């Protein structure tokens, strides 16, 4: 598993394969300034890393949502220049949230192309367990919004049961938050015209998703930091030092 701080190690061919695009596409995006330049290594070979992968995923997602190249360029110019691959993944999640659920039926070859990597039978089974894909005869029904996330989870060193339990917890809490926010917004616009309600919903959707993602990101970071601190200091999370009496 890699981290955001690892040195770029992918050639342009490897980057294109991992991202599920062509080398020509990578070069085109680079000439338009949509991708940062590669790190030039020995023998003048360019090397790419996680930031390039994350930016390609964001660009492809925006294209999937029907954004023009000019609109994509404007959107990327507005982003802070020091975004990490993790930050870019959050941006992509926000963009993906604008679109309705999309499920497509594809061949095994097309599934691997979209995944950006070969998929062993075990990988496909794990994706199916996460409800990302489902067999349909010789083809596969794919939840396009979840595919890239599911592929990333294949490399996470956690048991399948843990991943599924985490997914269940996220879905339950997300639904509860969505229902509560929906109730608050519904009450706030109860007396308004139907067109105003639809307009407000269209504008609020990406804003609410961004707020939820940002809040969850910060909360998770705080919780993980507390867990790390407690582990290094020998006390349970949220508790006190062992042997120290509480008030």
Image (tube, grey):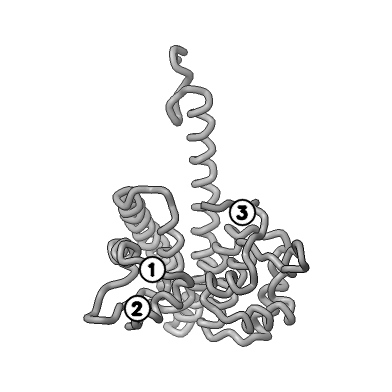
Q: Is residue 224 above or below residue 208?
A: above
45 or 217, which lies in front? 45
How many numbered discs?
Answer: 3
Task: Name the secondary structure under disc 2.
Answer: helix
N-terminal label among 3 and 1 = 3
Marks 1 and 2, how far apart in space? 9 Å
Task: Name the secondary structure under disc 3.
Answer: loop
Q: To which residue does mark 3 refer?
A: 4
N-terminal label among 2 and 3 = 3
Q: Is residue 51 left or right of residue 185?
A: right
**Numbered label attached to residue 119:** 1
- Are the two marked residues, 2 and 3, in contact with CB atoms closer than 8 angstroms? no
Q: Where does the image place residue 17, in percent across and percent down from the top left? A: 53, 73
N-terminal label among 1 and 2 = 2
Marks 2 and 3, how far apart in space? 30 Å
In this view, the residue farthest toward the left is 137
Q: Is residue 74 above or below residue 213?
A: below
- Are the two marked residues, 1 and 2, in contact with CB atoms closer than 8 angstroms? yes
Q: Is residue 214 above or below residue 221?
A: below
Of tags 3 and 1, the one toward the viewer is: 1
Q: Residue at x 54, y 45 (%)?
A: 221
Q: Is residue 134 left or right of residue 26?
A: left
The image quarter in which residue 36 lies: bottom right
Q: To which residue does mark 2 refer?
A: 108
Which quadrant would the C terminus be assigned to in this image? top left
201 or 143, which lies in front? 143
Of tags 2 and 3, the one toward the viewer is: 2
Q: Residue at x 34, y 68 (%)?
A: 132
Q: Residue at x 73, y 81 (%)?
A: 32
């Amino acid at each position: 598993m890699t981290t955001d701080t690892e040195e770029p190690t992918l050639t342009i061919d490897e980057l294109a394969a991992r991202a599920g695009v062509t080398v020509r596409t990578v070069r085109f995006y680079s000439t338009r300034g949509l991708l940062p330049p590669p790190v030039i290594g020995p023998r003048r070979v360019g090397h790419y890393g996680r930031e390039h992968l994350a930016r390609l995923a964001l660009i492809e997602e925006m294209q999937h949502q029907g954004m023009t190249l000019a609109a994509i360029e404007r959107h990327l110019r507005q982003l802070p220049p020091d975004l990490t691959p993790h930050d870019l993944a959050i941006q992509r999640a926000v963009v993906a949230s604008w679109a309705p659920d999309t499920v497509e039926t594809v061949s095994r070859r097309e599934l691997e192309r979209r995944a950006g990597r070969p998929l062993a039978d075990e990988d496909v089974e794990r994706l199916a367990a996460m409800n990302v894909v489902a067999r349909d005869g010789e083809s596969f029904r794919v939840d396009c919004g979840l595919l890239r996330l599911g592929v990333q989870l294949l490399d996470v060193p956690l048991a399948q049961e843990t991943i599924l339990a985490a997914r269940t917890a996220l879905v339950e809490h997300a639904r509860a938050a969505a229902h509560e926010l929906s109730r608050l917004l519904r009450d706030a616009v109860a007396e308004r015209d139907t067109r105003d309600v639809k307009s407000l919903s269209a504008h609020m959707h990406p804003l609410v998703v961004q707020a939820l993602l940002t809040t969850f990101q910060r909360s998770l970071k705080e919780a993980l930091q507390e867990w790390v601190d407690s582990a290094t200091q020998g006390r349970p999370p949220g508790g006190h030092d062992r042997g120290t009496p509480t008030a």
